[in-house]
Amino acid sequence: MSDNPPLLAVLIDADNTSPKYSAAIFDEIASLGEASVRSCYGDFSSQQMSGWSKVQAEFGIVPHHQPANTVGKTRAILPW
């Protein structure tokens, strides 16, 4: 058995996760293995996403810009 920790990929949905949880996320990941891939995905042209720019540099997260293809959230209308 190898003494090396498992290599893990951390893929963050930045549109639906606050950057304030980054430290907690990476602390938990460190207890499981090594975060060898650190990526976040979202529409970074939005002003609401500005908080991610600081944590991207701090935690070595690679941003992947994905423009929003709709405005707002779609909501299912239930018959009851």
Image (cartoon, rainbow, N blue to C red):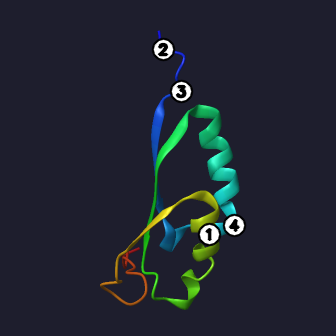
- The residue carrying mark 1 is 18
**Upstream in sequence: badge 2 or badge 4:** 2
Image position of 74 (left or right of 7): left
- The residue carrying mark 3 is 5
Q: Position of residue 77 (x, y in %)?
A: 37, 79
Question: Nearer the viewer's eye, disc 2 or disc 4?
Answer: 2
Amino acid type, residue under disc 4 in the picture: Lys
Residue drawn at point x = 58 percent, y = 33 percent: 32
Q: Which mark is residue 2?
A: 2
Callout 1 crowding tier (Cα within 10 Å): few <14, some 14–19, many ≥20: some
Q: Position of residue 22 (x, y in %)?
A: 64, 59
Q: Of helix, strand and loop, which one carries label 1? A: loop
Q: In the rendered structure, are the residues bearing label 1 and label 4 in contact, judged by CB atoms less than 8 Å apart?
A: yes
Q: In the rendered structure, are the residues bearing label 2 and label 4 in contact, judged by CB atoms less than 8 Å apart?
A: no
**Upstream in sequence: badge 1 or badge 2:** 2
Residue drawn at point x = 52 percent, y = 61 percent: 61
Amino acid type, residue under disc 2 in the picture: Ser
Spatial separation of the CA atoms under disc 1 and disc 4: 5 Å
Q: Position of residue 46 (x, y in %)?
A: 49, 88
Callout 4 crowding tier (Cα within 10 Å): few <14, some 14–19, many ≥20: few
